[in-house]
Image (cartoon, helix red, strand yellow):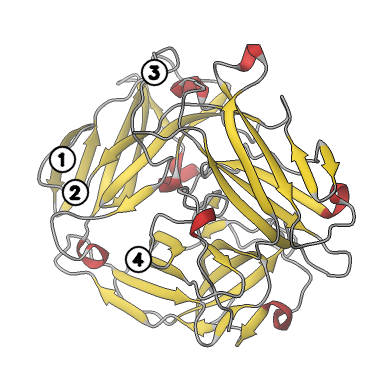
Amino acid sequence: MLKIKSLNHIYIITFFVFVSALAFSQQDSIPAKDSVMTNKTVRQNIKTVLLFRDGWDMSPPLLLYNSDEHLKLEFDDLEGDTKNYMFTIQHCDKNWKPSDLNQFEYIEGYYDDFITDFEYSFNTSRQYTHYELVFPTENLGPKISGNYILKVFVDEPDSLYFTRRFMVVEQRVDITGDVKDATEIAERNHKQEVDFEIKATRVRIGNPYTDLYVIVTQNGRLDNAIENIQPKMVVGDKLNYDYDKEITFDGGNQFRSFDIKSLRYNTDYIDHIEKNYGEYDVYLKPDESRSYKVFKTIPDINGKLKIKTEDERNTAIEAEYVYVHFFLKYNIPLVDGDVFILGELTDWSYKDYNKMNYDYKSKGYTKTLLLKQGYYNYMYVLLPHNNPVGEVSFFEGNHSETGNEYTIWVYYHDPGKDYDELIGVTHLSSREIE
């Protein structure tokens, strides 16, 4: 079986980042063979899908090749029954399209396996069944490095319930770098620049301009990722990526947050809590635009979430599902784009289920999400029509002082192999928030 050893020095605070990123809505169809594979929930009864390194629920789903590490998958089925859940994996290329490899070339063991660890919720207003899987199992694991999709289905692979991205990295290069205010004077107050160097210490790269594919991501987002970055200079086995403009990101702002670990009292940013007909409704305090406000250093977890209940002992099966009501003040509806709630709580996606609706009576944007008890980060993002990249600055402002997490991903296509290897991952932070 594949063995996973410690990779603490490259683990990032951002969960997915890269992985947990864009998700399809529940109504999306199963992707075709040549489609980009994403985090996708097909069935509406599936909630709170988490995939992380076993033992650290704030880590990304990233395994070190040929080591003893494992991933842990958790999810809830709101139908509250038991199903014959199974899983398999699909190898993907650097762009998350299914690779041309046969299953025996990237799977160690059987081609699918069962998810047998489950518990029924206890003493909750909404019944659900909680499932867990520690992966790789004795029967199934990844054989090579690269991008993978974990597919969960019932009985037959065509009966797909959800998918999640994960990666296996064979750390064959060393990556060092830092994040600083943009070099360009005009951008210095609102952009952050990522400079780094790759040292090919354990791999011989014939042509780094064609054989390497480097990506930089910010927090858990993929829509603003900078891809296919070419080295500025190559000296021996060192590749320099110290650009002034090419690898810069909007700083944005600290994430907004709310805490629903307890439903017995109102925490910061909670206006009030109601219980109606056995269901909980949590109303957040009205939000407003921060685009022209002075930057404040507010601790956050860079858009992630932490599932937790303080009202009971066992979070997995005793945490409640609640309706969380968002309200963003805005005098008139926008005509050039749509407003979305963005963060891990919405899989970093721009889909119907997290698109806000304008309420003319209350003069603002509203949305209600069904969420499990915990601590959540989020922000409001404007997605212009016909533009795949969201504008954070429209509602949140844009500051170079913002604490952000950046991840550098290095893929290598060996001319002698038929797939893209992941040969390096590292994490950089723009600020350490006290």
Residue at figure coordinates x 64%, y 11% from the top left: 186
The disc placed on residue 330 is 3
Tell me which label, 4 or 3, sits earlier in the chain: 4
Horizontal arrangement in the rendering, residue 23 relative to residue 281 (left or right): right
Tell me which label, 2 or 1, sits earlier in the chain: 1
Q: Secondary structure at mark 4?
A: strand
Name the residue carrying label 4.
76
Residue at figure coordinates x 47%, y 52% from the top left: 15
User: How far, Cα to Cα, is label 1 from label 3?
Assistant: 24 Å
Tell me which label, 4 or 1, sits earlier in the chain: 4
**Are the residues flagged by discs 2 and 3 in contact, CB closer than 8 Å?**
no
Quadrant of the rendering where the N terminus is positioned: bottom right
Q: Give amino acid for label 2.
A: Tyr
Name the residue carrying label 2.
280
Image location (x, y in percent) of residue 394: 50, 20
In the image shown, does 397 or 56 lie closer to the viewer? 56
In the image shown, does 200 or 121 lie closer to the viewer? 200
Q: Give amino acid for label 3.
A: Tyr
Image location (x, y in percent) of residue 110: 60, 88
User: How far, Cα to Cα, is label 4 from label 3?
Assistant: 35 Å
Name the residue carrying label 1.
273
Tell me which label, 1 or 3, sits earlier in the chain: 1
Mark 2 is surrounded, within 10 Å at the Cα level, by few (under 14), some (14 to 19) or many (20 or more) other residues, namely: some
Tell me which label, 2 or 4, sits earlier in the chain: 4
User: How far, Cα to Cα, is label 4 from label 1?
Assistant: 23 Å
Image location (x, y in percent) of residue 396: 44, 23
Q: Give amino acid for label 1.
A: Ile
State whether residue 27 appears in this view. Answer: no
Is 307 located above or below residue 192 in the figure?
Answer: below
In this view, the mark in front (4 or 3): 4
Tell me which label, 2 or 3, sits earlier in the chain: 2
